[in-house]
Image: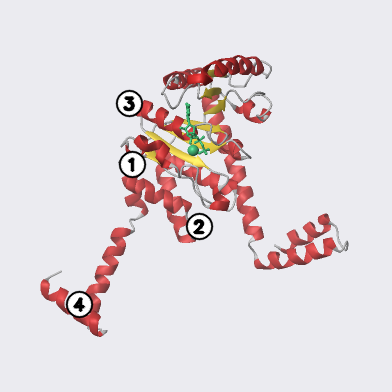
Amino acid sequence: MSKKNKHTSALSEQKGVSDPEMTNISSIKNIRNKRRSQPSAEDLISGILKGDVTALSRSITLIESTSSTHLEKANAIIKGCLPYANKSIRIGITGVPGVGKSTFIEAFGNHLTQLNKKVAVLAVDPSSSLTKGSILGDKTRMETLVKNTNAFIRPSASGDSLGGVARKTRETIILCEAAGFDTIIIETVGVGQSETAVHSMVDFFLLLKLAGAGDELQGIKRGIIEMADTIAINKADGDNLKQAKLAKVEFNRALHLYPNKDSNWQPKVTLCSALENEGIDAIWELILAYVNTTSTNGYFENKRQEQNKFWLLQTIEERLKSDFFKQAKIKEALKKQIVLIEAGKTTPFAAADYLLSLS
Ligand SMILES: Nc1nc2c(ncn2[C@@H]2O[C@H](COP(=O)(O)OP(=O)(O)OP(=O)(O)O)[C@@H](O)[C@H]2O)c(=O)[nH]1
Ligand SMILES: [Mg+2]
C-alpha cells in the first residue's frame, strides 16, 4: 500500500466515513486475502502431492470440520488424492495408559526416518469426543519427532462418535499417503472399542504391554491379544528386565493357545525399551517380515479390500443413523415415545416401528 493510501484509509477508518474508492480497494483486497488464505481444492491437492505439510494440515482440518461447505471441498480433495494413496505400511499401536506408547513412537519414528522413511503419526482417541483432548496432546514425549522434517504428527480428531472419529482418521490416512508418507502409525489407547476401529484400518497391529504386574494374562482382553500381530513388552530395562523376560515366555505360551491366523503369520512376542531405544529396530524387522509373508500369500491386499468393504458399510450406517436422529420431528417424537415406554403404554419395538415410519 502506498503512503498516501495508507494515510487516507487510516483517516476514513478513524472518521468512520466510507470513501467509495477506498471501500472498493479494500473489498478487492479482502477478496484477494480471502483467496490467499483459503486455497482451492485443486491448490490443496497439488500441494499435498508435492509433500507440502501445510496443505496437508489444512486439508485434514477440512476433513475434520463439520460444516457442509467444508465437506464438499474435503471430498474433492480425498477424491483427488485417492489415486496416489495406498502405498504405505499402516501400523496400529495400542496399549494401556502409561505403557509407553508416546515414548515408543518417538523412538520408532526416529528410527524409521533414519532409514529414509517418511512417517505420519495419527491417533484415534475415544476420549476426545468427550474431552476434546487428545492422546497425542503430549507432544513433549515426542520432542525430536515433532521437529523431524520427515515426520508428520497430527493429534486425533474429535467427534460425536468413535465411528465418526475413525472415519476421519481413515480419510486422513489417504491424504498422508498421497503426501508421500510411506509409514503411517495410528495410536490408540487400549481401553474400550477404539482398538477394534484401529485394527480395521491398519495392516499390522502392535500391542505394547508391561511386565511385572503379576497376572499379566488376566488383565488383558482376549480380543486385543487376538488382534495383535506382535506383542512388545515395553520397559524391558533396569530392574524390570528379568520380569519382562518371564512375561515373554508366558505370552509366547499363551499365544500358542490361539488358533492360527488367516494371515498365516504367527504373532511374535518381543522385548523393548522405548526409553533406552532397545529392541526398536527388531520390531521394524518383524513388521517387514510380516509384510513380506502376507504380501506373498495375498493376505495383505485382501485385508485392505475387506477393510474397504467394512468401512463402506460402516459409513452408510453412521450416516443413516445421524441423519435419522438429527431430524427435529424425530427428536420430538422420540421424547414422547420414551414417556410412553416408561408409562408402560407402548413397547420399544412398537415405538421403534413408529419412529422409523416418520422419517
Ligand atoms: N523405564 C522405562 N520407562 C518408560 C519406557 N517407555 C516409557 N517410559 C516411561 O513411562 C511413562 C509413560 O510413558 P508414555 O510414553 O507417556 O506412555 P503412553 O502410553 O503414551 O501414556 P498415555 O499417553 O497416558 O496413554 C513416562 O514416564 C515414560 O518416560 C521404557 O521403555 N522404560
Ligand atoms: Mg501418550
Name the amino acid, label 2: Thr
The residue labelled by disc 4 is: 9
Mark 1, secondary structure of its residue: helix
Q: Give residue 82's position: percent from left, percent from top.
A: 43, 41
Q: Earlier in the sequence, mark 2 or mark 1?
A: 1
Q: Which of marks 4 and 2 is nearer the N terminus?
A: 4
Mark 3, secondary structure of its residue: helix
Q: Which of marks 3 and 1 is nearer the N terminus?
A: 1
Identify which residue is drawn at 52% across, 52% down: 132
The residue labelled by disc 2 is: 66
The residue labelled by disc 1 is: 49
Q: Do the residues labelled 3 and 1 touch (CB within 8 Å)?
A: no
**How far is the residue under mark 3 from the one under mark 2?**
37 Å
- Is the shortest distance between ligand 1 and the CB of mark 3 under 8 Å? no
Q: Which is closer to the viewer, label 4 or label 2? A: 4
Name the amino acid, label 4: Ser
Identify which residue is drawn at 80% across, 65% down: 339
Which residue is more in the foreground, 209 or 111? 209
Q: Residue furthest front?
A: 239
Which residue is more in the foreground, 305 or 181? 181
Q: Which is closer to the viewer, label 3 or label 2? A: 3
Give the class, few, some or many, for how many residues have Cα within 10 Å of label 1's Cα (few <14, many ≥20). Answer: many
Q: Is residue 266 visible?
A: no
The residue labelled by disc 3 is: 114
Q: Which of marks 3 and 2 is nearer the N terminus?
A: 2
Name the amino acid, label 1: Leu
In this rendering, would 126 be left or right of 150?
Answer: right
Q: Earlier in the sequence, mark 3 or mark 4?
A: 4
**How far is the residue under mark 2 from the one under mark 1?**
25 Å
Q: Do the residues labelled 3 and 2 touch (CB within 8 Å)?
A: no
Q: Do the residues labelled 4 and 1 touch (CB within 8 Å)?
A: no
Vertical order, 241 against 137 (above or below): above
